[in-house]
Image (cartoon, grey):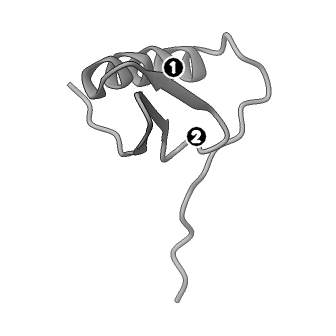
Amino acid sequence: MKATGFTYWQDGADWIGYLDEFPDYLTQGTSFEDLKTHLADLHGDLTSGKIPHVRRHAELQMA
């Protein structure tokens, strides 16, 4: 099982979040667990090639 970071917040009754590697793609859920399910599904879609021209976030190591 692979782990990946995500950022989330609660807005009223909704839980909203995005995968740290893909900050342009938000999703939401009705609970924290539901949000995590949607994030996992989103990760599958973004890494499978189903969605063209996916924008990613990365870090560059500087000397």
Image location of residue 5, percent across then percent down: 36, 45
Residue drawn at (48%, 34%), measured in percent from left and top? 16
User: Which is more N-terminal, label 1 or label 2?
Assistant: 2
12 or 46: nearer the viewer: 12
Number of callouts: 2
Identify the residue at horizontal 45%, vertical 14% (top origin): 41
Res 45 quadrant in image? top right
Q: How far separated are the C-alphas under marks 2 and 1?
A: 10 Å
Quarter of the rendering occupied by the N terminus:
top left
* Residue lying farthest to the right in this orientation: 53
**Residue lying furthest bottom in this view?**
63
Furthest-front residue in this view: 12
Which residue position is annotated with label 2? 22
Q: Position of residue 48 (x, y in %)?
A: 56, 14
Looking at the rendered structure, the kind of residue marked 1 is Leu
Mark 1: secondary structure = helix
> Amino acid type of disc 2?
Phe
Q: On the picture, is 23 further left or further right than 54? A: left
Q: Is residue 22 above or below residue 43?
A: below
Q: Which residue is mark 1?
A: 42
Tag 2 and tag 1, C-beta contact below 8 Å: yes
Q: Secondary structure at mark 2?
A: loop
Image side of residue 55 versus residue 46, left or right: right
Please tell me in which quadrant of the rendered image residue 9 appears. top left
Which residue is located at x 26 percent, y 36 percent?
3
Of all residues, the one furthest to the left in this rendering is 1
